[in-house]
Amino acid sequence: MSIVAAHGVHKAYGPHVVLRSAELTIDPAQRVGMVGRNGAGKSTLGRILAGVEVADGGTVARRRGASVLYLDQVPRFDGDPSAHDAAAAGLAGWHAARRRHDAVSGELARGQGDVAALLAEQAAIAEEIERLGGWDQTHRVDAMLGHLGITRPEAPLSELSGGEQRRVALARILIARPDLAILDEPTNHLDAETVEWLEQYLVDEHQGALLLITHDRYLLDRVAERTLEVSDGEVHAYDGGYGLYLEQKAERMAHAARTEQNRQNFLRREIEWLRRQPKARTTKQKARIDRAEEAMAVQGPKAETGPSFALDIVRSGKTILETRGLSLRQGERDLVSGLDLIIAQGERIGVVGANGTGKTTLLRALLGTHPPAAGSVVVGQNTRIAYFDQLRSGLSDERSIFENVGGDQSRIELGGEVIEVRSYLERFGFDGHEQKKPVAALSGGERARVALAKMLRQSANLVIMDEPTNDLDVATLGALESMLVEYSITALIVTHDRWFLDRVATSILAFEGEGKVLRYPGNYGTFCRLRAEARERQTSAPSAAAQPGTSAAPPARGARKKAALSRQEERELDQLPDAIDRAEQAIAALDGRLADPNTYAKGGGEVAGLRAELEAAKAHAQKLTARWEELELKKLAPEVAT
């Protein structure tokens, strides 16, 4: 029996209909992802399924006795408990089961009641205790909080940041092991390593069903067995994770387009026939007219229009931005020690690291709002920076979307072109009615889109973004990725979104703790591989210090550094970025054709060939990237001749 089943669910807020006729079921132990645009009704549906909110119409049936828990984007707690006590509240069901097991065992020991019934109940409770994590739970709370990056479990929640409070709420749900966990944007405020741990935990250890409302495409691809899309008030179901969802959605849209074309052709034929016929109608003719009128009454599929972004890029000088021996401190902690960083034109550097290691502080130092402990930041004379901060703090909550972006003007100048503010905001998914909303009434994703619209009004040649992917839906993320890549925008981006970094980053700046910051060539996947190889070399290489009586051998007399690269290799390295760019553009073009419904409109005969081309293009790009990494590493770490 399904844990939860929704039929014809309807929900409106005043005149705005969010859910029109939502249908879905979630079975035991099933892992389901949910996607959709910001404001489509994903969170509303999640709250209705959990019983936190009531639908206006339709039915929601939950299996008797099933526990359903919901992780809200803004969690709530009773009072001001410590992080440990708040998370330990997730063990309430386990404590109740233990107390009941002890009571039943006591009755059996005293020979009271129906022995057979008591034995059956004892066995059922023991099975429930095992499902909830076993007989010893004393270690789970601290271990879970540690995995989620809560370093002060004894601190009251009022002393923790909003992101830390969310992680405590997530820990509480994971510890509770409900029959169904509905997690609304669970990866927000988690660093990449913690997201990877969560992903593995959900796959390997979480035994209940899952509904993941998330924009994290890697998480969806690796965890979800089924993907639901909330669109136009309805729910469409697809098998598999994010990649399969994209393929199946393209096929569904192509089928809808073919159906609509057939309907239009039928109507054209019938209208021509009606024009040729005399006014007197036979019964047969009237039946034909009825069929035509029914076809006219059918509403065709709505064309989906995604957001579209662009940046007015101004010419930069030879130097865009660089740091020389930069050191940053926070109190007694070293965040960055002696960082030499050069940002060249067209580079897109992804910044990763655990929460609290200093990523945002580095951005503030580059912007001149955090003084260095040592070293310097050199900003090019012609450098113009567009900054997107994590808190979206440049917005006025009382003013409308239109006023925040356009100010008192109805038109703005963008790249030498004068356009209406209304038209500009439509590119970000805000129609005329929505543009009147005050920012205070917006969801996190809508607020992020307003902040993006305001930032991209600027003319710039360097974009610095702090967690831009938090709260954004996948359509907006795709538009942002396309803008950064297609316009070859120079950017420095702090984000935990691995899919985003794989699509966008040309190198990764990794904060590894205790002031150590290392730069790796390539995207996030390449960074993971290179870091794993480096760690493997460190653990496998014999340590001279660990072996008594040995010391490091001095270099041989006359040792000298070899040239890192030959002239031919230097020329090859100079040409590789353009070659990789062309290869990535070819991949993007093939991806676009495979996602285009028109590709499938004639039966999809060319799909197999396009997929083969795509695989070949990806292999070519991977080969070029591997060669670039090889030459970059050789350039950075020249060999020592003996």
Image (tube, rainbow, N blue to C red):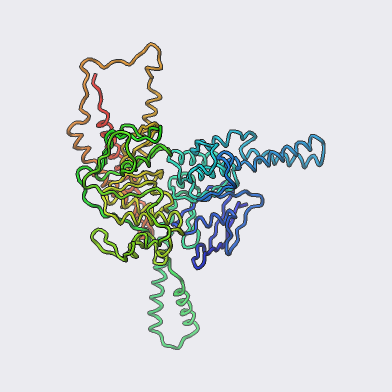
Residue 190 visible, this orientation: yes
Residue 80 percent across, percent down from the top left: 57, 44
Q: Residue at x 81, y 35 (%)?
A: 110
Q: Residue at x 46, y 54 (%)?
A: 35
Q: Residue at x 80, y 39 (%)?
A: 115
Quadrant of the rendering where the C terminus is positioned? top left
Q: Is residue 241 left or right of residue 5?
A: left
Most foreground residue, 95 or 403:
403
Q: Is residue 91 left or right of residue 461?
A: right
In which quarter of the view is residue 116 placed? top right
Q: Residue at x 33, y 32 (%)?
A: 337
Q: Given the current orientation, which residue lies at the most extreme left position?
A: 567
Up the image or down, 188 lies above or below 557; here it is below
Residue 637 percent across, percent down from the top left: 27, 29
Residue 467 percent across, percent down from the top left: 39, 46
Up the image or down, 139 lies above or below 592; here it is above
Count all numbered tags in the image, as a single digit: 0
In which quarter of the view is residue 332 placed? top left
Residue 392 percent across, percent down from the top left: 39, 51
Most foreground residue, 68 or 252:
68
Residue 609 visible, this orientation: no
